[in-house]
Image: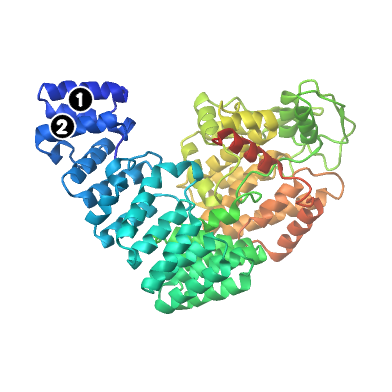
């Protein structure tokens, strides 16, 4: 369904004027086209419907003035719906209005007199009316956000009217309950679903009642209803997953897993059960292997019954699984203090040794007046690569680092500026999103690591620039390294350019780039089981090296490397234990203050929140 022709948009009044002019000239096709354009902009305007009535009268109600084709215009769909209703075919008209609602749920397509008229109920078969309400439910979120509810209220009025005419129709009561629940009318949803089950106990009726009870916070009643649904149809494994999800929401993970195991015993490949099982097992023990197994299942079963959000839900807000980990160290602490003081540099920063070059350069650029004193040279020297490498990105003049590579192309800067973001649903999704960098030259991808472009002039860019410029630099570095994963993918992994470069970056000068490159390798292990042993070995060696160095001097990236290790598929138990110790030693109690990224995302969300 399309929004219309790619021509300058006229106002509803202008389109109506042209429609009337064409109508007066007897040009009905052009009159219909302008009317369809007007109805998109003002679907409830009386003048629109008056003009539509004139077109219908002149054409004898010719529906083909508003044809349905492969690329149908939404205005034609809505106009045809009203003509069908006027011709005594309201059910067909409602079908088309619901299709328009699915296309644009925020538009008041149904807010017209004939839809909410009580007499319509007497002209609708209750079974057909129930199917129409179910189509509405399928077309809108569950639940519908409060600002999006008003355009859908005519359908709820329709449900009330049809139920007044058919008060004991079980399917109609259940469908009406489902719609009421989505629109926040929870008590009404419980009432209607209860009446439906009393009229005719069925599996679907019990499911609708269980959902209504769950929305009302009546968990025990919800579980009882869903279990009765299982009694009606023990082979509907989706209900098992619903019961498990409801139990998990109340903290009863063991009971939830018992239900999931029952479902998997019947069908080990049933997608809803598999997704729920991996999510619940991860919630129980925090082992990333469950999420990796779920990602593997998603990759191997692209034709799931419907879209699932379990993997994204588990990864959301977790270091490296769903977001960039904010930088640590004295330099970024000084940066955040200065930004909190409206850019005032504050006291000087004394460092026993240089910190990561990306940190030093980012802070120097963001707080030009900050006095930084490096009092010594640590051992091991953080200015030296941790292993010999041919990929030297930095050169030092004393304690001052400078890039060895030229500035990347404008195209590379634009592409990464468009893609870079501090959060992603899960590592495979980040990998897929980075394909937009696949055609960049290796020199450009490496250049982006040391010459990050300015943040975009978007809400996200303004928040990152104003609250923590270091996070934007880290975003660029992460996405540039993800772009490296798409470089020359025809080369076998073991001897590939992408692996060689990323591993060299991992063992280069201790820097934020180390983290970004290691994240790219971890992501490769998520999407390709064949590379997991290799990546796990690299991660284990790099974390062990960081832990060894940390005995002699601070390693600002150590905690982030530990989080990366905990996100790595097939990591050995000893390295996992080491990573857990490092994170435990560095992590403040969660109640102390929200994480930086959480605060930034909350600020960004407020910028978009509608009153």
Nearest the eye: 172 or 67: 172
Check disc 2 and report the residue beneath it. 55
> Can residue 271 be seen?
no
Q: Tell me if residue 123 can be seen.
A: yes
**Percent from the top left, x then y, of residue 123?**
22, 54
Q: Nearer the viewer, residue 133 or 599?
A: 133
Between residue 389 and residue 152, name the one nearer to us.
152
Q: Position of residue 496 (x, y in %)?
A: 53, 47
Question: Horizontally, is 29 left or right of 574 in the view?
Answer: left
Residue 217 vs residue 583: left or right? left
* In this rendering, position of residue 425 left or right of residue 320: left
> Label 1 neighbourhood size at 10 Å, few (<14), some (14-19), many (20+)?
many
User: CB atoms at circles 2 and 1 under 8 Å apart?
Assistant: yes
Answer with the quarter of the image where residue 398 lies: top right
For label 1, the SS is helix
| Quadrant of image for the C terminus | top right
Numbered circle sitting on residue 543: none
Q: Is residue 198 above or below residue 319?
A: below
Placement of the N terminus among the 4 image quadrants: top left
The label number, if any, that marks residue 19 in the structure image:
1
Task: Name the residue at the right extreme.
Answer: 375
Q: Splitting the image into 4 quarters, where does residue 3 fall?
A: top left
Going from N to C along the chain, the mark reached first, 2 or 1, is 1
| 180 shown above or below 58 | below
Q: Is residue 212 left or right of residue 462?
A: left
The x and y percentages for residue 7 are 28, 24
* Residue drawn at 77 percent across, 49 percent down: 546
Residue 69: x percent and y percent?
20, 42
Residue 252, relative to residue 470: is it above or below? below
**Distance between the alpha carbons at the discs numbered 2 and 1:** 9 Å
**Could you say which is closer to the camera, residue 224 or residue 426?**
224
SS class of the residue under badge 2?
Answer: helix
């Amino acid at each position: 369904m399309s929004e219309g022709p790619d021509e300058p948009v006229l106002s509803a009044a202008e389109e109506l004027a042209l429609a009337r002019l064409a109508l007066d000239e007897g040009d009905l096709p052009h009159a219909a086209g302008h009317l369809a354009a007007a109805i998109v902009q003002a679907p409830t305007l009386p003048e629109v419907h008056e003009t539509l009535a004139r077109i219908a009268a002149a054409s004898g109600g010719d529906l083909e003035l508003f044809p349905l084709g492969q690329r149908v215009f939404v205005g034609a769909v809505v106009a045809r719906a009203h003509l069908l209703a006027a011709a005594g075919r309201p059910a067909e008209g409602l079908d088309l209005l619901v299709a328009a609602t699915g296309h644009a749920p925020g538009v008041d397509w149904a807010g017209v007199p004939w839809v909410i008229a009580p007499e319509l109920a007497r002209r609708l078969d209750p079974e057909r009316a129930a199917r129409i309400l179910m189509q509405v439910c399928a077309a809108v979120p569950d639940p519908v956000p409060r600002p999006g509810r008003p355009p859908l209220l005519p359908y709820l009025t329709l449900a009330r009217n049809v139920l007044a005419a058919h008060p004991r129709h079980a399917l109609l009561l259940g469908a009406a309950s489902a719609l009421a629940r989505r629109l926040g009318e929870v008590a009404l949803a419980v009432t209607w679903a209860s009446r439906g089950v009393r009229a005719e106990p069925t599996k679907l009726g019990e499911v609708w009642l269980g959902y209504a009870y769950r929305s009302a916070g009546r968990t025990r009643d919800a579980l009882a209803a869903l279990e009765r649904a299982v009694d009606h149809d023990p082979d509907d494994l989706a209900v098992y997953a619903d019961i498990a999800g409801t139990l998990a929401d109340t903290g009863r993970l063991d009971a939830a897993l018992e239900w999931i195991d029952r479902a998997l015993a019947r069908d080990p490949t049933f997608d809803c059960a598999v997704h729920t099982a991996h999510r619940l097992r991860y919630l129980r023990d925090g082992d990333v292997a469950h999420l990796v197994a779920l990602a593997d299942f998603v990759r191997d079963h692209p034709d799931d019954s419907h879209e699932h959000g379990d993997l994204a839900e588990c990864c959301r807000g977790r270091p490296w699984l769903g977001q960039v980990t904010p930088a640590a160290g004295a330099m970024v602490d000084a940066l955040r203090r200065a930004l909190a003081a409206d850019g005032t540099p504050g006291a000087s920063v004394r460092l026993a040794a240089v910190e990561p070059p990306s940190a030093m350069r980012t802070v120097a650029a963001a707080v030009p007046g900050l006095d930084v004193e490096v009092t010594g040279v640590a051992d091991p020297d953080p200015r030296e690569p941790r292993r010999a490498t041919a990929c030297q990105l930095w050169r030092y003049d004393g304690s001052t680092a400078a890039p060895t590579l030229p500035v990347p192309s404008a195209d590379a800067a634009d592409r990464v500026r468009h893609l870079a973001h501090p959060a992603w649903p899960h590592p495979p999704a980040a990998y897929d999103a980075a394909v937009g960098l696949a055609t960049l030259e290796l020199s450009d991808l490496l250049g982006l690591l040391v010459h990050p472009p300015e943040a975009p002039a978007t809400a996200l860019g303004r928040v990152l620039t104003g609250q923590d410029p270091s996070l934007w630099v880290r975003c660029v570095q992460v996405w540039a390294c993800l772009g490296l994963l798409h470089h020359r993918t025809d080369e076998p992994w073991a001897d590939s350019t992408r692996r060689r470069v990323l591993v060299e970056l991992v063992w280069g000068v201790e820097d934020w780039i180390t983290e970004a490159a290691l994240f790219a390798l971890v992501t490769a292990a998520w999407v390709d089981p064949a590379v997991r042993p290799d990546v796990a070995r690299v991660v284990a060696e790099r974390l062990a090296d960081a832990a060894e160095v940390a005995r002699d001097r601070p390693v600002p990236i150590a905690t982030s490397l530990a989080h990366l290790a905990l996100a790595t598929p097939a990591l050995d138990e000893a390295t996992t234990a080491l990573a857990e110790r490092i994170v435990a030693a560095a992590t403040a109690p969660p109640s102390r203050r929200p994480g930086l990224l959480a605060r930034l995302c909350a600020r960004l969300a407020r910028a978009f929140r509608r009153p």
